[in-house]
């Protein structure tokens, strides 16, 4: 059953290291955007694609395509835009270049909504703010940062009720350690075609 949560795909990156639109890269014969939307369609009642190239996404008639409200503000601007247009109180956001999304883990995060404004995985590398759930209550604090050109994705967290999901909770969904991996270079794409097998 679909959750009354919005799924946001961040597809507005400059892709400067890759040189192509990462959303349409193929991993083992499936485009990244198709893999993400396949999961989103099963999980979310609403899908938003945030992009500055809306014409590239016209084929996805079950998703709403929106463009950045504040241009050139990076991921924070993209998440803000998605939340602004979301019709549900909570939204999950991730970029278009994450090939290892785990549907069960997203459902786990959704199950933690209700008393928190941010539900975010936290690994040894720190927060994973681009694989997290945000409430629309975050919008005013995010807007302040955007207008001040302070674009750190976690900069507004101190104003919000944050629930960090630790390694112990993440581990059952991340056996291969690739859950939060994204693709920045052609080598990353090559490596993702045949991910390492776990014993």
Image: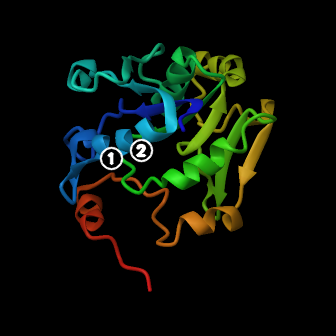
Callout 1 touching callout 2 (CB < 8 Å) = yes
Q: Locate the C terminus by quadrant.
A: bottom left
Query: Can you give x and y, in whole percent of width and height, for residue 36 in the image?
Result: 37, 43
Q: In this view, does 35 lie to the left or right of 90?
A: left
Query: Can you give x and y, in whole percent of width and height, for residue 7 in the image?
Result: 50, 32
Q: Which residue is at 64% across, 32% downward?
A: 134
Q: Which residue is at 52% across, 15% downward?
A: 85
* Structural crowding at the residue carrying mark 2, measured as other residues with C-alpha within 10 Å and reported as few (<14), some (14–19) or many (≥20): some
Q: Please, is residue 77 above or below residue 155 in the view?
A: above
| Residue at image mark 1 | 35
Tally of numbered discs: 2
* Structural crowding at the residue carrying mark 1, measured as other residues with C-alpha within 10 Å and reported as few (<14), some (14–19) or many (≥20): some
Q: Is residue 146 left or right of residue 118?
A: left
Q: Is mark 1 on a helix, strand or loop?
A: helix
- The numbered dot on residue 64 is none
Q: Is residue 18 left or right of residue 11?
A: left
Q: Which residue lies furthest to the bottom in this view?
A: 199
Query: Can you give x and y, in whole percent of width and height, for residue 14 in the image?
Result: 31, 34
Q: In this view, does 94 lie to the left or right of 12?
A: right
Q: Quadrant of residue 154?
A: top right
Q: Which residue is at 61% across, 21% downward?
A: 88
Q: Locate the N terminus by quadrant.
A: top right
Mark 1 to mark 2 CA distance (whole Å): 7 Å
- The numbered dot on residue 39 is 2
Query: Can you give x and y, in whole percent of width and height, for residue 95 in the image?
Result: 42, 40
**How are the residues colored?**
rainbow
Q: In which quarter of the image is residue 87?
A: top right
Q: Which residue is at 56% across, 63% downward?
A: 173
Q: What element carries label 2?
A: helix
């Amino acid at each position: 059953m679909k959750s009354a949560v919005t799924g946001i795909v961040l597809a507005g990156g400059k892709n400067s290291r890759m040189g192509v639109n990462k959303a349409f890269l193929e991993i083992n014969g499936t485009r990244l955007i198709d893999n993400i939307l396949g999961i989103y369609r099963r999980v979310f009642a609403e899908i938003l694609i945030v992009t500055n190239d809306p014409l590239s996404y016209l084929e996805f008639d079950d998703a709403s395509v929106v463009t950045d409200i504040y241009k050139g503000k990076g991921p924070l601007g993209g998440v803000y835009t998605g939340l602004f247009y979301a019709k549900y109180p909570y939204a999950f956001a991730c970029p278009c270049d994450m090939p290892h999304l785990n549907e069960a883990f997203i459902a786990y995060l959704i199950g933690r909504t209700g008393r928190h404004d941010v539900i975010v995985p936290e690994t040894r590398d720190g927060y994973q703010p681009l694989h997290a759930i945000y409430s629309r209550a975050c919008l005013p604090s995010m807007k302040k940062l955007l207008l001040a050109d302070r674009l750190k994705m976690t900069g507004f967290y101190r104003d919000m009720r944050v629930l960090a999901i630790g390694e112990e909770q993440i581990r059952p969904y991340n056996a291969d350690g690739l859950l939060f991996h994204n693709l920045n270079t052609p080598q990353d794409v090559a490596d993702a075609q045949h991910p390492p097998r776990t014993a």
